[in-house]
Amino acid sequence: MMTTRAEKYLKTAKLPHIWCPGCGHGTAVNALLEAFERMGIDQDKVVIVSGIGCASRAVLYLNFDSMHTTHGRALAFATGVKLARPELKVVVLMGDGDGCAIGGNHFIHSARRDIDLTAIILNNSIYGMTGGQLSPTTPVGSSTATSPNGNLMRPFDICSLAKAAGATYVARSTTYHVAQLARYFQKAISHTGFSVVDVISQCPTTFGRRNDMADPVDMVEWERDNAIPLAKAQQLSPKELEGKIVVGEFVDGSQSNGNGRGDGPLP
């Protein structure tokens, strides 16, 4: 009997999943499975690590050796796995809060060390699981549980942060651009060094309802209409880029760590 991709890569006994209808995380996980399938990945040679949050629940459904760790510490656990078993591919699934707020210090230092890990940030601009607080990527003016009158703080640009810290593969896509997303996942996992994929993922329940986008179709169409390829974005002014999502590969290969040295990645 032919085994479907879902049966091969998912723990079907754990389904249905807990994500809300219309959440983009399932789309992102499906793109990840597409990347694994294209690579002909050996599931016994992959470890998937996550922290806490909506994105981090993905490890419960993936049919791989996995670690569901503590909030913000996924990259620390993943570093330990990689140092102990350098032959393994280690993929780390995090949300924007888990990866870049409480886990922000681990994120920048993992990039600085250029550790051979793949960091996937499922970025829905909010703490979706723990009450709808604003996150480091919440857009200015957006309403959340902790900014009911609109967020006043500028958000992180995860790709710029990763690039500045020393990551040697950095890309961004959205849950609308699924073919591009699967391609970036494949390149990130194949890359030797610290790779980052920032995935713009919709949250209609916690973010959308507070910001007049409760319909997930509206949110996905917003991703489609506001995504700009990197090559085009480089020709536009900061004013023209306001409110847009720049998608593409920001770093593809080794780079200097900022002090003139081009040291290679750790194992």
Image (cartoon, helix red, strand yellow):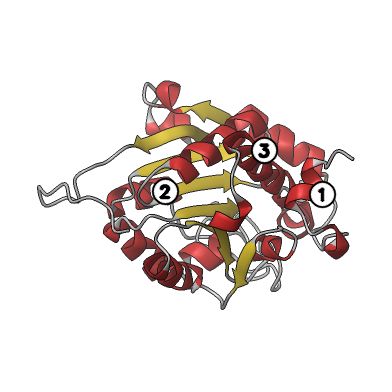
Instruction: Quadrant for residue 121, please give it.
Output: bottom right
Q: Which residue is mark 1?
A: 7
Residue 61 coordinates in the image, percent (x, y): 75, 60
Disc 1 on helix, strand or loop? helix
Q: Badge 1: few (under 14), some or many (20 or more) residues near its Cα, within 10 Å?
A: few
Residue 267 coordinates in the image, percent (x, y): 32, 58
Point out the tag, 2 or 1, that comes first from the N-terminus.
Answer: 1
- Please name whichever residue, 189 or 232, is drawn nearer the observer in this view of the structure: 189
Going by the picture, which residue comes out furthest to the bottom?
70
- Please name whichever residue, 121 or 48, is drawn nearer the observer in this view of the structure: 48
Residue depth check, mark 3 versus mark 1: number of the one nearer the observer: 1
Amino acid beneath label 1: Glu
Residue 106 coordinates in the image, percent (x, y): 39, 68
Point out the tag, 3 or 1, that comes first from the N-terminus.
Answer: 1
Q: Which residue is mark 3?
A: 34
Amino acid beneath label 3: Glu
Looking at the image, which residue is at 69% across and 73% down?
Answer: 130
Looking at the image, which residue is at 77% across and 42% down?
Answer: 5
Disc 3 on helix, strand or loop? helix
- Please name whichever residue, 99 or 238, is drawn nearer the observer in this view of the structure: 99
Q: Which residue is mark 2?
A: 195
Any part of residue 212 in sight: no
